[in-house]
Amino acid sequence: MTRIWIIFAGLAVAGLVYPFAMPGMLSVAVTVLLFAGWATAWDIAGGWCGQVSLGHAAFVGLGAYVVALGQVELGIAPWFTLPAAAALAAALAWCWGRLTFSLAGPYFTLSTIAVAEILRMVAINEDWLTGGAIGVFISTLPEPFGIDLFSREAQYWMALAFALGTIALVAILSERRFGYRMRAVREDENSAMAAGIDPTATKLHAFMLSGALTAVGGGIYGIFLSYLEPHVMFYLFLSVQIALTAIIGGRGTVFGPAAGAVLLVGAGEVFRTAFAQANLLIYGILILIVVLFFPRGLVAELTRRIARRRYARSAQSE
Amino acid sequence: MDTTAFLQNVSNGVLIGGVYALIGIGLTLVFGVMRTINFAHGDFTVLGMYGAVAFNAAIGWDPYAALIVAVPAAFLGGVLIERFVLSRLVEAPPETTLLATLGLSLIIGNCLLLIWGPEPESVNVSYAATTIALGPVRVSVVLLAAGVLTLAAITALWLFLSRTETGRAVKATASNRLGAELVGIDTRRIHSLVFGLGTSMAVIAGVALIPLLFANPTSLGPIFTLKAFVVTVLGGLGNVWAAIAGGLILGIVEVLGTAYLASEYRDAYGLVVFLAILLLRPEGLFGRTTKRA
């Protein structure tokens, strides 16, 4: 447990120092942090509780649209609309989970794609609410204490707070009763039930928490892009990217999804010039490698090997 | 309601639904035998479309002639994928194969994107706008060709499954893998064969669709995959005949929904039906009622 918090403190320090060390590379960093937060949030349902969703872009889109429409249409500041977006996302996750958690494994995954795609079509076609395919443009934002929310620095701090907050929450949960309940449900629902755990309620709570956190990141993403299109916000491949980031990093680990975000967004930046729009190719290749050779995920496998080597060395010295 | 227009819509729905059925059959065959949900299925359909485009551009033949090359290539590709990827994951949890095929889907789509770029592609055939009068309705030649191709592929598959020794071995493997092995069937070979057949069906559907639809590299694949899932879930996963019914239902629902409800939600109707069926009758409309695991 203490080791987790030592690593967390290291990450926090790195996050605090980064904008002063590399002030020119803030956009990439915001993307890394948003994906780190999203993948960690996804992992609450997908990794810890075993409910693989390929529809999380719905929560991203919901968060972004609530924040943008709140500002543009009603003039409500983001710090009010972000909690509202989280609450709405939790409510959406509750309805969605109620409907779909009776389905097992792969069927649940397929139903999440269907739900997110239906929401995307609603966002495209209900232009009275969402501006339709043209999208919403955030032109003005309030300036709390004179901070310009359009500046990359401010967006960096918001994204950092989102990512670190999500990771910290997962680190705490992993040691709490709820964390153990989620793992029990993931491993075997029937045994979990025999131990007095309600699997549906556990899955529902995990999914609500996961959705609410993802929506907060979505709201920050909306401010970061300041222009919202349904094709971007509710994009199927955004859902796929979030899920694969967590799985490639390591499902059901505290830092795996965040490490996956650093690896994949970084690789995406490196290969962007080589592959232009085809940067999802790297996700496809990596997920195949992970599934075939490292089923626990890259980061989880790495830490396991280090631990094993350390154990072997300590056994030798005795 | 105008009867002629209604019949026109239904006939279009039946023909497009036939192609959906063809895509769905490949998916349901693979699921029925291998218990694998193939997320890359729709991308093979897109590969078929691009195969026809390439064939047409390279030697100027009719796009349908691409089948001569595309079907054996798709079969071989399917067999190789099964051998080198999926056969290693037989013992893994079910979502593992879903993730592996999702990876394949991303690889296929993005490789097509690298080769062709993001602009939609299609082929121009001289008979694209030609229609034939069948009683009160007019049917476009390309839709009719798609229907004929679908019928031929499904008939061939049916003959194979019911009349040949290998086909019966496939059915045996689907109903009980261990039992099939006990009577001397090499089920690993059957798995490769079935995955090859599945990809071939998807590619045939792609060739049938190219004169009708524009091909684009990344986003069309998942749309087809979803449609195939809708088709198979409508009928009950693993049941080839029910997939045909599911395809026809999806085609008719889409065309009628577009004509009489709201045309913007064309792709949503199928998904809503899909969710409703998954939730209310997970064994499918025509599936046998079994206890859920």
Image (cartoon, helix red, strand yellow):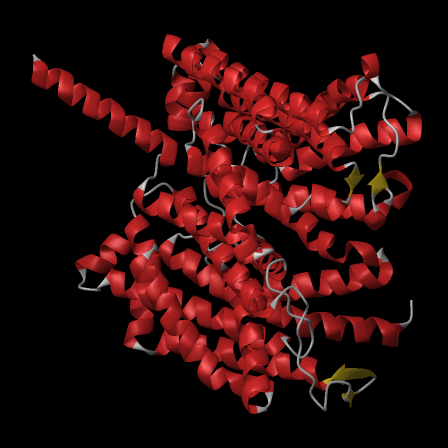
Picture layout, residue B13 above or below residue B276:
below
Q: Is residue B154 visible?
A: yes
In the visual, does B39 lie left or right of A75? left
User: Residue placed at 34% from the left, 55% from the top?
Assistant: B86
User: Residue placed at 33% from the left, 66% from the top?
Assistant: B80
**Residue B181 picture quarter:** bottom left
In the visual, does B48 lie left or right of B121? left
Where is residue A217? Give x, y as percent.
66, 28
User: Residue placed at 37% from the left, 22% from the top?
Assistant: A191
Image quarter where the N terminus of chain B lies is: bottom right
Q: Is residue A244 visible?
A: no
Q: Nearer the viewer, residue A306 or A216?
A: A306
Q: Nearer the viewer, residue B6 or A241?
A: A241
Image quarter where the C terminus of chain B lies is: top left
Where is residue A121? Give x, y as percent.
76, 48
Where is residue B95? Give x, y as percent.
43, 43
Counting every numbered tag in the picture gives 0
Where is residue A30? Give x, y as percent.
63, 31
User: Residue placed at 51% from the left, 63% from the top?
Assistant: B111
Q: Nearer the viewer, residue A202 or B273?
A: A202
Picture layout, residue A108 above or below residue B241:
above
Picture layout, residue B201 above or below residue A89:
below
In the visual, does B28 lie left or right of B273? left
